[in-house]
Image: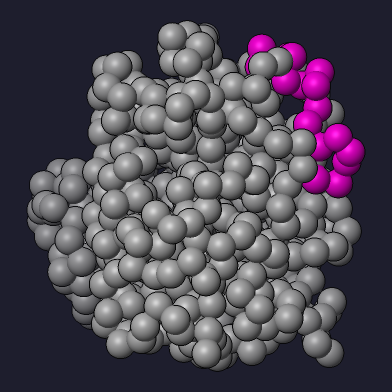
Amino acid sequence: MRDHLVAVDIGTGSARAGIFDRDGRLLAKAKYPIAMFRPKQNHAEHDSEDIWAATCRAVREARAEAGITAAHIAAIGFDATCSLVARDREGKPLTVSTTGRANQDTIVWLDHRAIKQADQLSASGHKVLEFSGGSLSPEMEMPKLMWLKQQLPQSWERAGYLFDLADFLTWKATGSLARSRCTLTAKWNYLAHENPGWSADYLALAGLEDLLEKGGLPDETVGIGTSMGSLSRRAAEELGLDTGVQVAPGMIDAYAGAFGVLGGVSGGASEGAQLETSVALIGGTSSCIVAFTRESKPGRSLWGPYYEAILPGRWLVEGGQSAAGALLDHIVLMHAAGGEPTAELHGRIIARVGELRDEIGGDIAADIAPGLHVLPDFHGNRSPLADPHATGVISGLTLDTSFDGLCRLYWRTCVAIALGIRHILDALSEYGYRFETLHVTGGHVNNALLIELYADVTGRKVVIPENRDAVLLGTAMAAAVAGGVHGSLSEAGQAMDGGGTERLPDPARAEQYGRDYRRFLAMVRHREELRGME
């Protein structure tokens, strides 16, 4: 009986595969690294064939570990970062790199080479920008496509297919050129609530009148909760599956994670009230805040609202931080007492922060680093300022190069990341969003400091899902509908949701973090003051 699912998640540095049963239990998972090339500052590239090879290895290993045959698999789903894959007219890798190497055919999501193009589009005031927060990030696909056409005209001339990474994976799996509504709506300025979804004058404004031809892009998109078709014979062989497996439309990784933690409140008697007051916080290299609403509530600096990016009849809105886990890694790496930011070193630092806090006793207002303050915008500010040029700030540094000095800076950086989330939530509230509960998933669930701070700094209840891998779970939920295991996305969400544990904010710390937040906002103002001085 085909009642198991395969979920594949392509992150910044690895391909992961998980095997789930119909109840959402993760039976096995496997992970393989993918290479990243950094030929220039702000340039980051992948090899799409390397990604596919890592995907196939991970799927084969996970299925073997789960101990089930291919005949038990109903469907496979893919989620991925919003990276841009280029192929020529024969479907072969096409360079996006200044090196000219064909295997460097994918611009990674975090690549900021297209800041100038993003600024140009943002300044246009075009109406499609109402559905991307009034501006564009260089992480989006349109600025990257503009850069590609302007800077590598030979590649553009030879282009035959341009994919969001998740769509590339479904193409490799099925041979279908159909594209996901999730990817095109969220990352390509496709307006799923309008007909036609592509805005011809916007494409002309970007100098991309020939994009649909060069990219092999369709006029219509495929919604999540449907099937792209079955695995091709070649893909089935490479993945260690069979041609009876259905393929779900691709998903943006953060949105898969949001569905994974909010799927349980997406239907049934709780539909509406609970979903409208719940928000997903997907914390990893970067952080994303994602919510689903019945009404379109546009606002500056938000990504979206995107119609039916995941749930039918619902709008999706996103805010986020361009560097969160990556910022903590950077702090560890750059400090004299730090080093390679391994999980073990992070653990030692977090443990020592706990000891330092214990040493100052029961004074709830005390802080182990009261003179240190951090603005976490080391890779620009995605939300709520929508400023890719923003830079990080550390105020209060001394000559301290000790390990305890590192721990104090790490602690205040964690506080800053949580304050940044509060800043985003405050901005969302100004546009009519009201969130009472943060459902946290991603790597940050393993950082006890961040979990504590997300509750205490924002003043919201935090829910940590029982299944700590909500990105894979959300992808499996979508696959369950594509494979007919569950009848709808809401049914899959409720059936496969494993519940979670709650953490309530400590009201005794509200005054302390309120003071920190006022300082945080003052630092934002002062940074702008300095930037504006002549």
Front residue of 192/377: it is 192
Q: Nearer the viewer, residue 367 or 327?
A: 327
Residue 257 visible in the shown view: no
* Predominant SS of the magenta segment: loop
- Can you say whether 11 is above or below 313 in the image? above
At 15% from the left and 44% from the top, the residue drawn is 399
Q: With 57 as the anchor, is 196 left or right in this view?
A: right
Task: Choose top left, top right, bottom left or bottom right for residue 410.
Answer: bottom left
| Quarter location, residue 436 | bottom right
Q: Range of the magenta residues?
A: 192-208
Q: Quadrant of residue 405?
A: bottom left
Whether residue 128 appears in this view of the structure is yes
In percent of the image, x 36 and y 86: which residue is there? 68
Q: Colour scheme of this structure image?
A: one colour
From the top left corner, tell me how far across and down residue 46 is, in percent. 33, 38
Q: Residue furthest front?
A: 233
Relative to residue 381, is residue 33 depicted above or below? Answer: below
Image coords of residue 522 (percent x, y): 56, 43
Task: Point out residue 105 in the picture as x, y percentages from the top left corner.
Answer: 37, 30
Residue 353 included in the magenta stretch of the image: no
**Which of these two is toward me, 241 or 59?**
241
Q: Residue at x 74, y 65 (%)?
A: 311
User: Would residue 106 appear left or right of 439 to someone viewing this image?
Assistant: left
Q: Is residue 365 left or right of residue 479?
A: left
Specify whether residue 205 is painted magenta.
Answer: yes
State left or right for residue 45 relative to residue 136. left
